[in-house]
Image: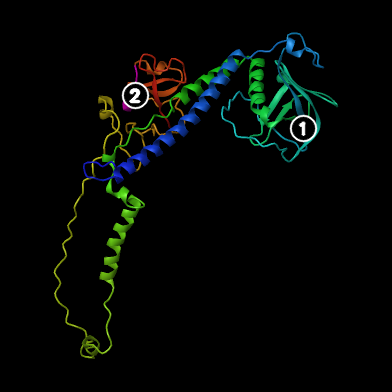
Amino acid sequence: MAKTDSTGSTWRYRWAYRQNERRQRAFRDADEAWRRRDDELRRLRALAGSFQGSVEAGVGLPIELAPGEVVFWTLPAAQLVEVRHTAVLPAPELTIDPDPLAVRPRRPEGLKVTDAGLAVLTNRRLVLLGGRGRRDWAYGRMTGLAHDPAAPVTLIQVLDRRRTSGLLLPTGAVADFRFKLTLAFADAIEQRAAVVAQLDELIAEHTQTQPFRPGIVTPAQARFSARVPGGRRTVAVAAALALVVPAMLFESDPPVRPGSDVASAATPAATATPTPRPVAPVVRVETTIAPKPRKRTGAAPTPSQSRTAAPQLAGERRCGAPANPFGYDYCGGSRIRKPAERICDYFECVPGFWSGRGYVVQCRDGMLSLTGGQATACAGRQGVRRTLWT
């Protein structure tokens, strides 16, 4: 027996079932992608905290380690490539890319393979032990470093070598090699804490983007337009046609049949200029239609916000942020590490706001804090709710 609501309709139940299935499917896909990225970020964070080499890892390798030098990583299937033309690479950076693009197993144009062998990563240098000899890239002499985003190639420039060279690796080892090379270089310049802080910031920012489970749609929420194939779009097109077609028929001239009285009346006397009739003056009345009030989605304005209210431009997006002349909103953009001096005139800020060291975030109690990206962000205020953007 088919289910019916108080109106005796079954299409409402079918509509609610389809809507709930679509929403749950979209939520599952988004949640799965979010969890994959979260697991990867936390894996990198754990690796950055425990990353260390050992002298025992270099036992049996055809390389002589310097005093205090330890081995971090080895790969027996690396190829030495050299750039055929002169290239200037950017300076080495400690930037972490937790979600890199998939690289293809290809060699870019302008590179030639000159050797192949065992790649060794230590706390002082990157070494390739090839069939034609050894190639060293010492961190202390490194002036340029570039990872190809679409190919498994890493190019390096050093002071004691004129030609730019690097490694061509198997695609499965690219992400692990690049991350460990960043950690090894950070260790060499005593900046591993900066890499760890960057990962903590990425984890805190990613936590704020966790998708929420959608609400359940009931049959009572179904509109009649859902019963029409095409939904609201079909109803809108039909309504537009219902208005346009009568208007076109009204403005068109009626057809005149040959031999009718109207046609025969087209005589010189009939075509004479008629006597002008008095026309009453036209009085134009201008009315002002008040805009329809919009539903408020944010919290009630604070006294400081109502006291210093900024006009909102037409079409301006804020995503729940109060009107402000700085262009700050909760929709997206760049993090705010140096906010405007008058930000607390338009937003509700926590006590001691300017003593924070981070970027601007909104706590779960609605107050702004300058502690974004830190483990103690919004401490005592139920944690971070979302980031303020510019």
The segment highlighted magenta reads: 343-350
Q: Examine the image and state in which quarter residue 310 appears.
A: top left
For residue 48, above or below residue 234: above
Q: Examine the image and state in which quarter residue 130 appears.
A: top right
Q: Position of residue 275 (x, y in %)?
A: 16, 82
Q: Is residue 328 left or right of residue 79?
A: left
Taking the image as drawn, is residue 342 in sight? no
Looking at the rendered structure, the secondary structure element under dot 1 is: strand
For residue 81, above or below residue 47: below
Q: Is residue 252 left or right of residue 373?
A: left
Residue 349 sits inside the magenta stretch: yes
Q: Residues within 10 Å of mark 2 (few under 14, many from 20)?
A: some
Q: Examine the image and state in which quarter residue 272 appears.
A: bottom left
Q: Which residue is mark 2?
A: 344
Q: Position of residue 267 (x, y in %)?
A: 23, 91
For residue 5, above or below residue 355: below
Q: Residue at x 53, y 20 (%)?
A: 42
Q: Residue at x 27, y 85 (%)?
A: 257
Q: Residue at x 34, y 50 (%)?
A: 231
Q: Residues within 10 Å of mark 1 (few under 14, many from 20)?
A: many
* Kind of residue at badge 2: Cys
Residue 312 sits inside the magenta stretch: no
* Kind of residue at badge 1: Val
Foreground mark, 2 or 1, reads 1
Cα distance between the residues tagged 2 and 1: 55 Å
Q: Quadrant of the N terminus?
A: top left
Q: Decide which of 153, 341 is in the foreground and name it.
A: 153
Taking the image as drawn, is residue 147 in sight? yes
Q: Which residue is mark 1?
A: 81
- Give the farthest residue toward the top: 67
Q: Residue at x 74, y 10 (%)?
A: 56
